């Protein structure tokens, strides 16, 4: 039985951006992630070891969000790679990262990138 584990609306203050002021003062980011895994063992045994632990998923995202990068695409790629490395039960990842109030010279609530990858 396959299913999805998702974390939605994760908020981080981080230092990603092309412009120097973004990397100095930082900005707010929102992250949504969904991973596909096999729930069979967890459902049968009622045991966390048979599924993806939310805390592990959050830690991977938090650790990468703490490392400054110029591009959100770089951050997303590292998060996905780390998930596949650390969580072998994950079959696919869908990830969305949004920069709140991006500096584009006009009013914009968020700039978003989305990536998906299948193992």
Image (spheres, rainbow, N blue to C red):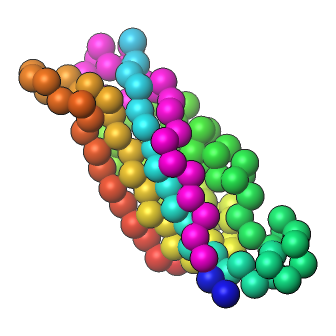
In the image: residue 54, left or right of residue 83: right
Is 64 left or right of 1, judged from the image as shown? left
Q: Position of residue 109 (x, y in %)?
A: 24, 31
Comparing 77 with 109, the one in front is 109
Which region of the structure is painted magenta?
3-24
Taking the magenta stretch, the answer to whether it contains residue 12 is: yes
- Is 12 left, or right, of 85 in this rendering? left
Residue at the left extreme of this rendering: 106
Q: Residue at x 55, y 66 (%)?
A: 35
Q: Quadrant of residue 49?
A: bottom right
Q: Nearer the viewer, residue 54 or 83?
A: 54
Q: Is residue 32 magenta?
A: no
How far from the left and from the top, in percent, is residue 47? 88, 69
Residue 82 sits above or below residue 70 on the image: below
Say whether residue 98 is left or right of residue 109.
right
Q: Is residue 47 above or below residue 113?
A: below
Residue 22 figure quarter:
top left
Q: Residue at x 50, y 33 (%)?
A: 11
Residue 101 found in image quarter: top left
| Residue found 58% across the figure and 70% down from its top | 4
């Amino acid at each position: 039985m396959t299913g999805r584990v998702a974390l939605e609306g994760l908020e981080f203050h981080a230092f990603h951006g092309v412009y120097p002021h973004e990397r100095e003062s930082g900005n707010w980011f929102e992250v949504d992630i969904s991973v596909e895994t096999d729930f069979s063992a967890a459902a049968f045994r009622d045991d966390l070891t048979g599924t993806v632990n939310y805390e592990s998923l959050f830690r991977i995202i938090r650790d990468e969000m703490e490392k400054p990068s110029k591009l959100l695409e770089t951050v997303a790629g590292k998060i996905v790679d780390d998930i596949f490395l650390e969580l072998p039960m994950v079959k696919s990842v869908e990830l969305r990262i949004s920069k709140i109030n991006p500096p584009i010279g006009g009013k914009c609530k968020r700039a978003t990138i989305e990536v998906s990858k299948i193992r």
